[in-house]
Image (cartoon, helix red, strand yellow):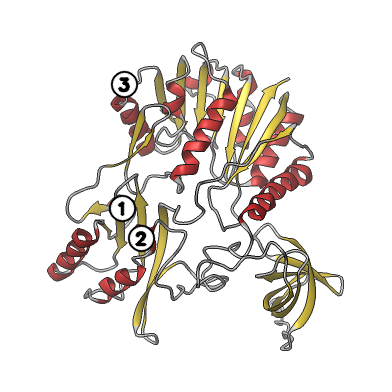
Amino acid sequence: MGRRRRRQKLPQEPREARVDSLSHDGRGVARIDGKATFIHGTLPSERVMFRYTGKRKNHDEGEVVEVLEASEQRMTPACRYFGLCGGCSLQHLEAGAQIRYKEQTLMDAFAHIGKISPGRVLPPLTGSSSWGYRRKARLGVKHVLKKGKVLVGFRERSASFIADMDSCEVLHPKIGHALADLSSLIESLSISTRVPQIEVAMDDERCVLIFRILEPLTDEDREALLHFGSVRDFVIYIQDGGPDTVRPLGEAADLHYTLPDYGVELHFQPTDFTQVNSGINRQMIRQALGLLELEKKDRVLDLFCGIGNFTLPMATKAGQVTGVEGAEELVARASDNASRNGLENVSFHVANLYESLEQEPWLRQTCDKVLLDPPRSGAFEVLAHLPRMGAERIVYVSCYPGTLARDAAELVNNLGYRLVSAGVMDMFPHTAHVESIALFEKT
């Protein structure tokens, strides 16, 4: 048997530190006796007192106890649960500084991972408000006997417990200011200890709540949920098994959002992937299409197309658009959206873009321009096909700088493209999440 590693005893007394920088997850970084120490709640240039929360071989962790010298960029968090809830990590940092931090995170990834840099840094995309923007979320639920109540919200920072909170300032107000009422609702159910999760999905107007249930509802439970939905203008769904068991408790919601710049409307199901921030999504589409410089003669390939968020707007500008997505249900939704909008110059295909694609019919076509919008894992496996198809211009939308930088290095160093420009989009204000966009051109 292996020797069990002894947990290091943590110093009990607070210690002073000078913070040098921010880490990729928004924690301040100080060097204590030559060792990196990540301190939650601190900002660069600050002198603080902190308490150790963990010691590891290569780094230590801590949390701020007192700020002795504050950064000029420090703000008072708008949410009283900041520091307890793990949903946000940057509320104490001024909005403009948050953007600069995200830009630096992206440029550092390009430099350190990709060993490249963009020819131009694009102006950041920001919303009119950094509050109440979030329209998609998964909320934890827990009946805590010691507290004598049901908790509804995000998990605590660095813990698996549900934070004790009755509001959330980054969620859309319709749901963000209803957490206490949701708690009371679940407390009233006969299965109050058997509801572990509520999923939130909003369109331009409606809000769906999907209650995950581990035991059947009674008639009284059903009535309570439907009454709550009627009074608070929520559409109630339930899920009593896997994803295919999600269904409306009463009438189904016809969820859809509009993209006024292109005169299209996209319909979706509550469990479909959609962008959490509708305002930034519209700006993002506008910027992506502008970077592609679409013309009526263009043949465009949209990989990881989802329900057609980029595909349909591109179809209003280009000659032919082909969308490819791994989830069959999303492809069906995208095709339906194209039909609803009267777009006949677009086609969709189901394909796992992380596996061999040699037999795919769409791969034997040519394309002038490509849009990539992959998940966190990136798009590396499909990149080598793009120059063979004739792609002269590629716009890459990324939700993780690390894989964007890796893929950018492949495009630039091995596939004959240059990184023309790149920039960040503030899809998730007050978090360390970095959403970005990059343009590549064939050399």
Mark 2 and mark 1 lie on one chain; the one further toward the N terminus is 2
Q: Are marks 2 and 1 in contact (CB under 8 Å)?
A: yes
Instruction: Identify residue for label 1.
Output: 207
Disc 2 on helix, strand or loop? helix
Residue 259: percent from left, percent from top: 40, 33
Disc nearest the viewer among 3 and 2: 2
**153 over 414 or under it: above or below:** below
Disc 1 on helix, strand or loop? strand
Q: Residue furthest right?
A: 34
In the shown orientation, is residue 290 left or right of residue 34? left
User: What number is the disc on residue 152?
Assistant: none
Q: Quadrant of residue 123?
A: top right
Residue shown at the point (39%, 87%) measured from the top left: 146
How far separated are the C-alphas under marks 2 and 1?
8 Å
Residue shown at the point (32%, 73%) measured from the top left: 183
Q: Are marks 1 and 3 in contact (CB under 8 Å)?
A: no
Instruction: Identify residue for label 2.
Output: 175
Residue 367: percent from left, percent from top: 55, 17
**430 over 311 or under it: above or below:** below
Q: Quadrant of the N terminus?
A: bottom right
Residue 18: percent from left, percent from top: 80, 71
Type of the residue with mark 3: Gly
Instruction: Identify residue for label 3.
Output: 342
Between 109 and 329, the one lying in front of the other is: 109
Q: Quadrant of the C terminus?
A: top right
Type of the residue with mark 1: Cys
